[in-house]
Amino acid sequence: MHQSAPAFRPRVLHLAQPVDGGVARVVLDLARAQLAAGLRVTVACPDGTLAADLRAPGADVRHWRAGRSPGPGLPGEVRRLARLIDEVRPELVHAHSAKAGLAARLAVRGRVATVFQPHAWSFEAVGGLTASLALHWERWGARWADRVVCVSEAERATGLRAGVRAAYTVVPNGIDTTRFSPAPVSPHASPHASSPTLLPAPLPVPGPRAAAGAPLVVCVGRLCRQKGQDVLLRAWETVLDALPGARLALVGDGPDREVLRRRAHHAVEFAGAVADVVPWYRAADLVVLPSRWEGMALAPLEALGCGRAVVLSDVDGARESLPPAFAARCLVPPEDPVALAGAITGLLSDPPLRAALGEQGRRHVVARHDVRHTADRITAVYRELLGRAAAETTGTGRLVPSERRESIHS
């Protein structure tokens, strides 16, 4: 009698540090999708909002005390992680971002199937000797990753150019396309109108719309050098010369907050960290992310999901986030405030084009960047790695029970 194949239910241990920004959103969305699919999900991370959010859908959350950046505490962090892995006994470890990837690979050293997801390469974030050390580590540490998952082909190409030789798989970032969606359409809108009338989207804090019809530009991201808000502030003076009523909102918090405040024009609103960014996307006339480097940023996908046109710096993942027709209008060279100001001014001055780009962008994200597709592709990587490991170990293709795995400390 035919028997159906057993359910694929490995225990997966996600390691997360940092625990804010895009990395945290990726880990949370992926854990939710994997729990819904029946995987046994444990997440190790420092305490905070991410840990609380993960417990809500039923993830097993373990406290891992670790700083955001490598430092003198790294050996202790690795030892604590090794003990935690021995307790959880996962079939597979999935480490997110440079710090967790560093600690995980040192703790595991190939003894458990390991996936490393850089979410932008560590050596891009620093300079000088630190960059050289980071690059040397990524080249060396690649031997302890069964798979390196990149969120864009461009991120993979950056790794290869840098000499990071690894088994790569590209899985583009995804978003919850139900949550990140356009504002509801007014029931009083005319069916013959050229564009739908959206219900009012009140901003979470007062200020950015000083005058009726004043265009609003929104930048969502951690306030740090990577995200390039300083470049946007330099461009903003030129935008105001052309559109004096325009307003800019920086949504997020981070180490550069006070420096940026001192540079900012009066027409700039610092919204801080917000619990829900959707109202900001929906209220925006244009969303801008002038990053210096990325793997594939989530903010542009979220904005497109909400039906908003975007302007991005042309870094890793940006072109792959957009429909091909967007490149000429929506991409500018990184660290170029003149080009950035020109793109912003051009789109703010053309509402019909912005609406058309927003509609096309929404269709693109639904088709290519739904988080459910992302989770399915990650699970396919797990199946491949665990099936291969089991076949090599038992010759049967069955998963090796975690109780029989070698101790990390041995």
Image (cartoon, rainbow, N blue to C red):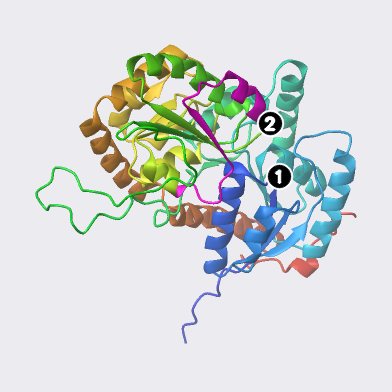
Q: Secondary structure at mark 2?
A: loop
Nearest the viewer among 48 and 201 is 201
Q: Which mark is residue 17?
A: 1
At 61% from the left and 65% from the top, the residue drawn is: 397
Count of numbered tags: 2
Report whether residue 235 is seen.
yes
Residue 272 lies in the magenta stretch: yes
At 12% from the left and 46% from the top, the residue drawn is: 193
Mark 1 Cα shell of 10 Å, populated few (<14), some (14-19), many (≥20): many
Question: Residue 270, position in %: x, y?
Answer: 55, 34
Nearest the viewer among 143 and 330 is 330
Instruction: Work out whether 83 lies above or below 158.
Output: below
At 27% from the left and 43% from the top, the residue drawn is: 359
Classify residue 184 by image quadrant: bottom left
Q: Which residues are magenta?
A: 256-278
Nearest the viewer among 160 and 237 is 237
Residue 296 lies in the magenta stretch: no
Q: Which mark is residue 267?
A: none
Q: Amino acid at mark 2?
A: Pro
Q: Is residue 207 left or right of residue 95?
A: left
Label 1 near label 2: C-beta < 8 Å?
Answer: no
**CA gap, disc 2 to disc 1?**
17 Å
Question: Residue 163, position in %: x, y?
Answer: 64, 24
Q: Amino acid at mark 1?
A: Gln
Q: Is residue 17 left or right of residue 212?
A: right
Q: Is residue 89 left or right of residue 280?
A: right
Residue named by callout 2: 255
Which quarter of the rendering shows the C terminus? bottom right
